[in-house]
Structure formats: structure tokens, C-alpha cells
Image: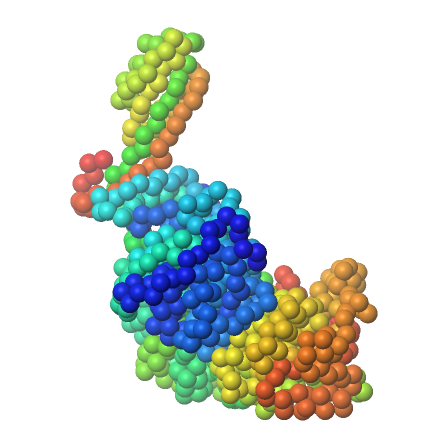
Amino acid sequence: MDVPATLKPVQKPTSDAQTHNGAELLIKTLADLGVDTIFGYPGGAVLPIYDALFNNHDLKHVLVRHEQAGVHAADGYSRSTGKPGVVLATSGPGATNTVTGIATAMMDSIPLVVLSGQVPTSVIGNDAFQEADIVGITRPITKQNYLVRDVNNLESVLREAFHIATHGRPGPVLVDMPKDMLNSRAKFKGTKDVDIPSFKPTIHGHQPQIAKAARMLSEAKRPLIYVGGGAILGEAWKEVTEFAERLNIPVTTTLMGLGAFPESKPQSVGMLGMHGTWYANMAMTECDVLLAVGARFDDRVTGRLNGFSQNSRKIHIDIDPSCIGKNVDVEVPIVGDVKRVIPAIDKLATPPQISEWWDTIHTWKKEHPLVVPKADDQIYPQHMIKMISEITEGNAIVVTDVGQHQMWAAQHYQYNHPRSWITSGGLGTMGFGFPAAMGAAMACPDRDVVCITGDGGFQMLTCELATAVEYKIPVKIAIMNNACLGMVRQWQQLFFDNRTSYSVFGSNNPDFVKMADAYGMIGMRATNPKEMREVLEKGMAIKDAPVLMDFSVVKEENCYPMVPSGAALFEMVESDEECKK
Amino acid sequence: MTKDYRHTLSVLVKHNLNTLSRIIGIFSAKGFELASVTFASEADPGMARVTITTYGDEKTVEQINKHLHNVVDVLKVTDLTHKKCIERELAIIKVSTAKVGRPEIMLIAQAFKAKVIDITSDKLALEVTGNTDKVDAMIEVLKPYGIAEMSRSGSVALKREFQGAVNIN
């Protein structure tokens, strides 16, 4: 961004052992809070911060090419590690560019701290150059946000921001910092304790409710555990897995919960919801006791509400009370941290007698497996995911964009580890995948990171190829290229009489391999299964640089099973033919 | 959303406009009803009290309650609906005296224990205090005479200390 003309030249901060200017204080506090990486983009209002970052060795600053990508990268960094992601943007357009990224993090409860520059306090409200009321703009999409006018409050606000972002139900917090505040001086206090009387999330569940839940599960005939993203955010995967295995109760995970329970375990019935497995959706429909663990009964999970799991008594554990009873009435609400509540239920519950229920589920699994087309000389999307799963041995961090490829990646990659599946579930943000994968790859240098993306979503933030090359981020970009917006096209085909309005790119897509070449990175293309294996094996072997792999897949393939919009879970369809009926 | 219940929520918050905006934002973003809202400083420095009246069934108001609690700077939410509480609203009403003359309007004012606070050749300004029902009732009575302008404060309310059987309201 240009340097705002309204801003006076900045005095070089004099080094003074007693006090620091706001910018130095910011860096010092971030380092003290354990932040090692920030994703940012400079501009006029944040020049004091960039000056403080010059030759700074406490923090690694990653220069992205678009602020939205910076937020997604910080988001990917957070989802792969559990640590809060940190973003830095300048005032006005820099700050507004972060909005989609912040909303993405808010919907999926990802802890982020977004630092934005602001015009000097004297001109706030005057429509100054590069001024935007970012606190006002981001209010509905942040857990909390601040405008710091007094440098003496900066350190405590930052500590509060990190505390709020990471405690209770996590979420993004924005701190807006006027330029004159960044140039004013104050002492670094180093007081680590944060006490916010109005912010005390409930951690331990209510004991009588826990006892009731344990009794219901022990006596159940057809129980089901429904695990959401809360089990990942609350790092409760070990507790959930031990609990489900000991009680031998079937487990379904939501899109956000993939990896919280290993899909290799016999108790797993895979993902449920709009593109969930047939047997998970049937188990949800037929169960008599439902234990929801850090899940929020999203519309993509429930389908038509009055056809959703009608005969079950429901137990819901969530750290956010407003999630309980929002969409679905619950008999046993338990507000608390799943990591604490699950072991407490485990202590009181006995394995239910459910061999008949298991027989039913096994029959469903046999009769309605996930649909995979017969192999021929073309690349089917499902085969592409299965081959990536095979070559990475299910150990990669898979990051996706949004659409058909996302659903196929959710269905056909076997997720056995938490924090290994990164996707924009709630907001469904196209463009999220590639920058989030960069963030994950920077946070986890010892793991393979595969960005499974579509030709649509990838094109939303291709500018980040420059970032990936500059920092040698070893992210493997696998483009499922069907030359169209597959999910839009699928809906148009199925529900709009095949009128594919503005969803087909066809030959208007760029040559992605040449694009990679232009950025100075390796690009490869595959058009048949044999080439796909060669490209994937070659690509996955590259450990010190990004690589782009363009896979031309069968264009007409649709994603099934599918619960059509407005239908109940049990009304899911498994093929185009069935859908037309 | 059923409109059968009017709820009064008393919310203790940290005194800043961001908090007030977040509270109002819950109602606009989630589509809840907002009948009235008042916001003013508390006795404790740095604190403020927001009194909200809203309509909705029990389930809706429970959600409102939970969302209010989720606002970081909200310290306490009290639903006064089913509690014994002291609730007052103030209204200033300018009534036309053209049709019936001053004495009749003043008689009505007297009945409602309202004060005359301004007089002009063709209007009387009345100040009335009471619970919302009383203010509503007085407005209804005055409507046929022609209400030129009016301004209502919205409800302010607090829980009664004595929650026993005797109702001295």
C-alpha cells in the first residue's frame, strides 16, 4: 500500500532501556507470548512496526502477497499446531482485506490475533487516507476486538487478546493500533497473568448431567457418538478414542472433526452429513442415544431438521452454551471442556449391549460403501484422493479449498491423526486452501503438506505462489482440474435442469504448469492414472520447495452420497440416476 | 417466533461503546426482537447497565441470554421476567389541546400521576413515569386528542431485594 500522505515522517526510535515505542512494545510482547511467526504485509500506518521488525531476530515475519492469504496462512498455522495464528496488516484496504480470513476463522473457531494499523488518533473519523473503521467492520466476525488509543494499554490488551482467542471456544481477536500510538513510548511490564472477570468459560461439566449421560449411554440399544471440530480444538482426541473403544460405540465425525477419531478403528463409521457416508447418516437417523461432542448440529450435518434423528435422546457437550439447543433440542446439555467431560462420563459408563446395532451397521457398510468409479484410462477424482492417501500413507496434512474436491478429499483420504485435515468448513471459503497449506507447512516442517484444491479455488489466491517460492515452503499443490466450478455445476445439473450458468471455465483456465514455471517453481501435469502416479511420486519426494501438480480429472463426475438441500439425512441419494428420480 | 412473552433483561457490562454495539449486533445479526434498550453508567466506575426488553418464547430468550453471556465484556445477565422487579419507564408526551381544551387533558394527567412540564397555546407537554403498561395505557387514552410528539426512555429495571410472597408493586 502507498504511504499515506497525511502521515508525518517517523522519527527513528531512540533506544532507551526504560521505555519502548508502541511498535517495539508490540514485538516484545508477541515474543514474550511465545509467538514465533507472523504473516503480514506492510503499509503506511504500520511502518513503525515494520521498522521495529527490521533486523529483528525474535520473530519470523512472512511477507505474503495479499492480506487475505496472510490470515488464511495464520489460520493454517493454527489448525496444524493448536497455537494462535498472528497476522499483521496496515490500515484501510490492508485491514479490510483480512475480513474474509477472519470470518473463516470465526466460523471454524480458530484462535487468531489480527493486528491492524490505524490512522493517527487525531484523524480517526475524518475519512483520512487509508482509514477504515475496522473495529466496526469486524465486530460480528471476531470474538473480541480493540482499538488501542493509549500505548500504556497496548501490552495488557495484547495479552488479553491472546487469552481470549485461545480460551473457551477459540476465535479470532483483532487489535487495531493507531500510528501515533505506535510511536508513543511506554514501559514493558512483563506481567503474564491475565484476569478478565467477565470472561470465565465453564470447563468442568455439571456432575449430575454427566452421571445421567453415562447412564443413558450404558443402557442404550443403538448409541452413536457424533464428534465435531471441538474435539480437535479441545485436543480431546485421545480421550474420545479411548472412550469410544472401551464402550465399543460407533463414532461418526463431522467435516471439522475428521482425525479426532481414527478412521482405521472398527468403531468408525466415517463422516456424516450432506456428503457423508450412507451408514453414518443412517446410524444418525436410527440411533436411540446420541452423544454430541464439540459439534454444533450444523445444517450441513442435520439435513431437514424435522427428519433428523427423531428417535434419539440427545446429550450435547460443548464449551459454548449458545451452541446447545440452538438447532436441535437436547435432553442432557453439558457445558464444559470435552477433554474434561469425556473422561468424567467414561468413569461412570459401562459398555452397552449393542451387538444387534453393530450387525445393522455392518450390513449398511456392506450394502452401501462409498462410491468409487471403475478404473479406466482417465483420472477419476476419487482415485486421485485415494492415490494421494496411499502415497502419503495417510500421514500427510491435507489442506483443501471448497467444493467437490473438498468433499472427495474428506471421503476418500483415510484420516487417522488429528490436526491433519484443514478445511474451511463453516464459511466455505474458496481460496483458503493454498495459503492455509503454506501456513501449515511453515508450522510443521517435518510433515508432508498436500494442498488438494480445485482449479476454481486455487485461482483465487495464486499470487501466493511468489510467497511459497520466496520462503521455499514445501507445500504440494494438487489441483483437481475439471475446468469448472464442480460443486456449482453439480447443483446446476441436478437441481437447475443442467443449466450450467457461469460455472464452466473450459479452455479459459491458464496453463498451471507454465504458471508455476513463471514463478520459478516446479510444475507437472498428469492426464491419466499412470502419469498421475509418476507425478505424485516425483512431487512428494521434493522436500525443500513448493511443487504444483495439475491433474486433469473426469469433468462430469459428481460427488455422492448426497443429501439434497431440504431433504432429510435418510433421503440421501447415491448416483445421478437416483437423484433424477 | 411467538410474541407471547415480553422479557426484561438486565445486563451489567464494561462501559464502552464496542460492548454496546456487540449487544445490539446480536439482535440484528440473529434476528431477535428488540423492543427497547437503555444504556447508562453504573455506580461502579467503568461499568454500565444495559436494560433490554425483547419479545420471544422461552427458547429464543434463552438463546439471547447465552449470546449476551458470550460477549466478552458482559459481566452478568439477569432475566427479570419471572422475578419480582422494579421496572420504570419515563415518557414525555406533547398533546394537542385544540379539541377539548387544557382542563380535560390535565384531568387525564392527574389520573396517571403525570406532570405538566410545558404549556403552549395549543399543546401540553406531560411527563409520566411508571411501568411500561401504565405508559402504554396513558398513550392510548391521549391518542384521540392528538399526540403531536412523544419520547419514551425505554424500560429500566432492577431485581427487588425482597423476593418473597408479598408484592408491594
Q: Where is residue A216? Give x, y as percent.
A: 39, 75
At horizontal 31% and vertical 25% (from top left) the residue drawn is: B128
Q: Quadrant of residue A393?
A: bottom right
Horizontal side, residue A187 vs residue A431: left or right = left
Residue A120 vs residue A193, the one in the foreground: A120
Q: Quadrant of residue B144?
A: top left
Quadrant including the C terminus of chain B? top left
Residue A304 vs residue A340, the one in the foreground: A340
Asked if one can make out residue B117 in the rendered structure from this viewpoint, the answer is: yes
At horizontal 54% and vertical 70% (from top left) the residue drawn is: A63
- State the scheme by which the image is colored: rainbow
Above or below, B105 relative to A264: above
- Total residue callouts: 0
Q: Where is residue A49? Give x, y as percent.
A: 44, 63
Residue A41 vs residue A8, the one in the foreground: A8
Asked if one can make out residue A290 in the rendered structure from this viewpoint, the answer is: no
Q: Where is residue A537? Give x, y as percent.
A: 67, 91
At horizontal 76% and vertical 79% (from top left) the residue drawn is: A552
At horizontal 19% and vertical 36% (from top left) the residue drawn is: B168
Q: Where is residue A105? Give x, y as percent.
A: 50, 65
